[in-house]
Amino acid sequence: MIKSIISGFILCFILLVACTIANVNSETVLFTAFILLVGVAIIISGAAVSGDRMRANLATESKTDKKWRITNSINLMLAAAPVLAVFLFIHYLI
């Protein structure tokens, strides 16, 4: 869990350095990275499917698959949290 948050801060740092070098609006890049991370987390978790499909997925998947899916979606959301925090900091305070 801590590794995911640290990787989110590292991702923010890399994106900010790249935006500075390329002279690109960092708000847009950070918001896009946040949306991508959350979108992938939603896709992995299976929250974007209908109820019938979710029931069928839960009935047919193994416990290890379910644990992998939940763990990775949580890790992606935790990595997205620092990106959102830096985006909000830049947007409102700078």
Image (cartoon, helix red, strand yellow):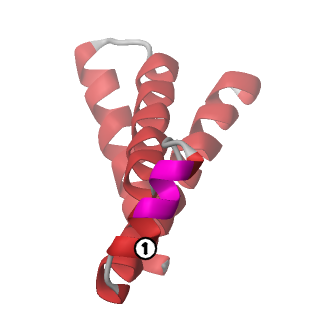
Residue 35: x %, y % from top left: 48, 32
Residue identified by numbered label 1:
59
Q: Is residue 61 above or below residue 94?
A: below
Name the chief secondary structure element in magenta. helix
Region rendered in magenta: 52-56
Determine if the magenta segment contains residue 3: no
Residue 66: x %, y % from top left: 39, 77
Instruction: Classify mark 1: residues with Cα within 10 Å, few (<14), some (14-19) or many (20+).
Output: few
Residue 72 or 32: which is nearer the viewer?
Answer: 72
Q: Quadrant of the C terminus?
A: top right
Residue at position x 75%, y 25% in the image: 92
Horizontal side of residue 90 vs 12, given as left or right: right
Residue 8 falls in image quadrant: bottom left
Q: Is residue 7 above or below residue 24?
A: below
Residue at position x 59%, y 41% in the image: 84
Q: Amino acid at mark 1?
A: Ala
Residue at position x 33%, y 36% in the image: 15
Residue 66 or 76: which is nearer the viewer?
Answer: 66
Residue 20 falls in image quadrant: top left
Q: Is residue 6 visible?
A: no
Quick one: SS at disc 1?
A: helix
Q: Is residue 5 above or below residue 23?
A: below
| Residue found at the very far bottom of the displayed protein | 63
Q: Is residue 34 visible?
A: yes
